[in-house]
Image (spheres, grey):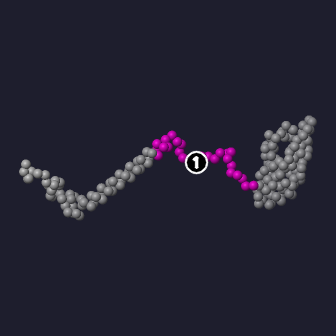
């Protein structure tokens, strides 16, 4: 082989009409614009890949789950209420039940109301005897079996609604038994 047939690195590549100095046109676009478009295409490819991967992963993880909506608060749940003010001025009540052979009951109650409601506190003090009468009549109309401990919550609610019917300056929030005894 001769030297002319040997491999020359200068001859490899584009023809002389395609080689252009820096900043000049090589074809119909400048070289720096081609490089910018190449990097933009690479960046766009990474963004598309990242978004696709995120969406697919999110859908796989959440498959079969109900939407992430807020759950309804259970009626049994309640935040801790603010402490109430209590009126303990009602005297001990004693009476008999409405049984054929009457039982004797003794009760001391307190009335709970919202703090800061001074008008209601004044009204409770003014209606003290009326409230005691309401409680006495209510308990006297019950039979011994109706005054058992498992019914205390129901008795308290009924007393609360009876007392609230006569109050004008507000409503009591709770009736509390300090003592409640039923004997034969």
Tell me if residue 54 comes above or below residue 29 in the rendering: above
Q: State the residue at coordinates (41%, 47%).
A: 53
**Crowding at label 1, few (<14), some or many (≥20) Cα neighbours within 10 Å?**
few
Q: Is residue 68 magenta?
A: yes
Quadrant in the picture for the C terminus: top right
Q: Is residue 175 left or right of residue 74?
A: right
Tell me if residue 184 comes above or below residue 29 in the rendering: above
Label 1: which secondary element? loop
Q: Residue furthest top?
A: 100
Q: Residue furthest left?
A: 2
Q: Residue furthest right?
A: 101
Residue 153 seen in the current view: yes
Q: Which residue is mark 1?
A: 70
Tell me if residue 107 comes above or below residue 16 in the rendering: above
Please provide percent x and percent y for residue 70: 58, 48
Residue 135 seen in the current view: no
Nearer to me, 71 or 136: 71
Q: State the residue at coordinates (23%, 64%).
A: 23
| Residue interval drawn in magenta | 58-83
Please provide percent x and percent y for residue 16: 14, 58
Q: Main secondary structure of the magenta part?
A: loop
Nearer to me, 153 or 3: 3
Image label count:
1
Dividing the picture into quarters, in which one does residue 74 lie? Answer: top right
Q: State the residue at coordinates (38%, 52%).
A: 47
Q: Is residue 183 magenta?
A: no
Please provide percent x and percent y for residue 158: 80, 45
Q: State the residue at coordinates (15%, 56%).
A: 10
């Amino acid at each position: 082989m001769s030297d002319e047939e040997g491999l020359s690195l200068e001859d490899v590549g584009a023809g002389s009409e395609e080689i252009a100095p820096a900043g000049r046109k090589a074809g119909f676009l400048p070289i720096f614009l081609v490089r910018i478009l190449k990097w933009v295409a690479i960046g766009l490819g990474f963004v598309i890949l990242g978004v696709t991967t995120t969406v697919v992963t999110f859908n796989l993880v959440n498959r079969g789950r109900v939407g992430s909506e807020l759950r309804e608060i259970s009626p049994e749940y309640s935040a801790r209420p603010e402490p109430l003010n209590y009126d303990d001025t009602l005297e001990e009540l004693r009476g008999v039940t409405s049984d054929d052979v009457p039982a004797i009951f003794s009760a001391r109650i307190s009335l709970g109301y919202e703090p800061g409601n001074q008008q209601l506190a004044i009204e409770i003090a003014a209606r003290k005897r009326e409230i005691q009468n309401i409680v006495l009549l209510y308990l006297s109309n019950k039979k011994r079996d109706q005054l058992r401990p498992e019914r205390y919550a129901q008795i308290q609610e009924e007393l609360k609604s009876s007392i609230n019917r006569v109050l004008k300056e507000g409503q009591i929030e709770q009736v509390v038994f300090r003592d409640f005894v039923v004997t034969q």
